[in-house]
């Protein structure tokens, strides 16, 4: 192509970016124009967000998504396009700052010629300025779409944001999670303490959530008592961990603690994940509300275990043969009574098998035994597993001959007689939850077991507090 025509074609590419003000579409357009300019069949783009760092935002062609890093450090990006083996990398520059990076591969001509550096650099600078401007516009739009009373985003903005996230998730096979939080006793707070106290309950709930969200997360006010949160690129286990952090942050928030002493306002939360729980926004919200109701009906709530120590929970749940029956609950079953002596060992073996079958599945597993020996079933079952396994496994007990393990973290607990009399297994995973507590006696083993997710989550939190274990 003659030089004047190449110049006109480059100008048209630059103008096409100006005509794409919406950030998500702009990022895809930048990747398309640079790939077309350089004759690349495949490409990926990392771009700045409202926080530091470049995140993977778009890709097409023969790109192996799993091999692409999720984040790129902009300080490692050169200011001019460069070749790296068979790939061609183009920085996106705005006023001297790196705001993005495009990686191009699979050149139609077999290679990316040196004469591409100058036009690619020019288009990269124009793209960088366009992305920075689109980020500013998006930020201003978000600031103008907040609820005046609470500072949360409006439901209309949240719904629009969710629609865009669903589009991205479907196009790029990504996942995201939605959470709903309800201030169940807000009407009682308003009745007994007045409207200002009710607004303070809302503000303190939002402050607690704002303290743990990322720049890409969005929190919106849905009704007087409900708030929604959307977490991009977050799986169900990640949503469960966020839910735990959020509820703890709400308990720790100073204004919320003061109000709780006067009238408990009882925050309940539920999570759902695209696409496992639904492929549209309404389905995801319905699943959130269903899980909120499950939490309200949980044995953890019925027995008022919140705030008790782990061993108080254990004694209350185990009881004995003369203890009253456990309260009736809907959904996940919980039972206590005599259990087979081999059940504890068999469950450890089965958990190990599950982790071997799905090594990438994320979860937390805690096993408590009198002594940490190499022949503990879960330790034997996980001996050959890949060290990069997604779940974290902790084995608690008195020091024995097991001191290290490829994937198990030993937690040595000396001088605690309760671990000599009891054994337990707690499993909190991506869509799975189970607890077995047992006390061995003369001629019989007395146990409690449950697949109630809220109860298991509460036991895990209490155990982590009891032994100063990493909470998330």
Image: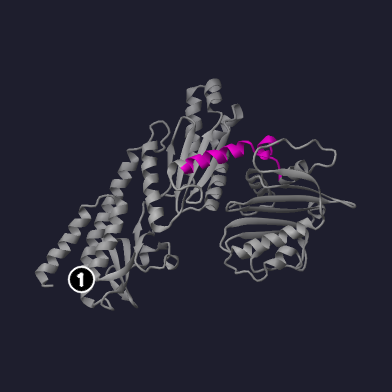
Given residues 17 and 421, the one toward you in this image is: 17
Count of numbered marks: 1
Residue 130 visible to the viewer: yes
Q: Residue at x 66, y 43 (%)?
A: 332
Given residues 81 and 442, the one toward you in this image is: 442
Q: Is residue 350 magenta?
A: no
Q: Residue at x 55, y 48 (%)?
A: 240
Residue 396 visible to the viewer: no
Up the image or down, 357 lies above or below 197; here it is below
Up the image or down, 167 lies above or below 201; here it is below
Q: Is residue 288 magenta?
A: yes
Which range is magenta?
283-309
Left or right of 30 on screen, residue 395: right
Please tell me how crowded label 1 is: few (under 14), some (14-19), or many (20+) other residues with Cα within 10 Å. few
Left or right of 352 on screen, residue 17: left
Q: x, y (%) of residue 80?
A: 27, 69
Q: Residue at x 25, y 65 (%)?
A: 34
Left or right of 306 on screen, residue 37: left
**Principal secondary structure, stretch drawn in magenta:** helix
Q: x, y (%) of residue 134?
A: 28, 51
Left or right of 277 on screen, residue 17: left
| The N terminus, quarter of image | bottom left
Residue under label 1 = 118
Q: x, y (%) of residue 287?
A: 52, 42
């Amino acid at each position: 192509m003659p030089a004047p025509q190449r110049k006109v074609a480059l100008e048209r590419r630059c103008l096409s970016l100006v005509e794409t003000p919406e950030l998500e579409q702009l990022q895809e357009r930048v990747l398309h124009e640079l790939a077309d300019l350089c004759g690349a069949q495949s490409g990926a783009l990392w771009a700045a967000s409202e926080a530091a760092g470049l995140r993977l935002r778009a890709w097409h062609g023969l790109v192996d998504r799993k091999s692409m890093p999720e984040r790129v450090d902009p300080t490692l990006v050169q200011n001019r396009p460069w070749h790296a083996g068979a790939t061609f990398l183009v920085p996106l520059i705005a006023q001297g700052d790196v705001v993005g990076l495009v990686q191009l591969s699979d050149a139609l001509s077999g290679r990316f010629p040196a004469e591409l550096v100058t036009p690619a650099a020019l288009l990269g600078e124009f793209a960088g300025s366009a992305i920075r401007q689109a980020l500013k516009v998006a930020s201003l739009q978000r600031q103008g779409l907040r609820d005046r009373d609470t500072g949360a985003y409006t439901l209309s903005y949240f719904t629009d944001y969710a629609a865009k996230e669903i589009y991205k998730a479907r196009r790029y096979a990504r996942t995201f999670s939605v959470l709903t939080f309800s201030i169940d006793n807000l009407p009682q707070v308003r009745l007994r303490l007045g409207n200002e106290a009710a607004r303070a309950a809302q503000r303190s709930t939002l402050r607690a959530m704002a303290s743990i969200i990322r720049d890409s997360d969005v929190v919106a006010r849905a009704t007087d008592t409900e708030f929604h949160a959307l977490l991009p690129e977050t799986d169900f286990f990640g949503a469960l961990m966020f839910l735990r952090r959020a509820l703890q942050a709400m308990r720790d928030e100073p204004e919320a603690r003061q109000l709780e002493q006067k009238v408990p306002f009882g925050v309940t939360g539920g999570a759902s994940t695209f696409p496992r729980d639904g492929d549209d926004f309404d389905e995801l919200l319905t699943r959130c509300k269903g899980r909120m109701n499950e939490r309200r009906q949980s044995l953890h709530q019925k027995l008022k275990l919140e705030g008790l120590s782990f061993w108080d929970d254990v004694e209350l749940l185990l009881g004995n043969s003369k203890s009253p029956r456990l309260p009736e609950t809907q959904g996940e079953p919980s039972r206590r009574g005599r259990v087979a002596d081999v059940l504890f060992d068999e469950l450890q073996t089965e958990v190990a098998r599950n982790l071997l079958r799905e090594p990438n599945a994320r979860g937390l597993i805690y096993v408590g035994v009198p002594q940490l020996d190499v022949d503990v079933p879960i330790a034997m079952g996980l001996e050959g597993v890949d060290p990069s396994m997604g779940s974290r496994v902790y084995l608690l007990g008195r020091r024995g001959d097991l001191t290290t393990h490829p994937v198990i973290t030993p937690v040595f607990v000396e001088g605690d007689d309760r671990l000599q009399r009891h054994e337990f297994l707690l499993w909190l995973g991506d869509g799975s939850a189970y607890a077995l507590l047992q006390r061995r006696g003369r001629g019989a083993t007395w146990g409690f077991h449950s697949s109630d997710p809220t109860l298991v989550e509460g036991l895990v939190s209490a155990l982590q507090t009891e032994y100063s274990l990493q909470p998330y």
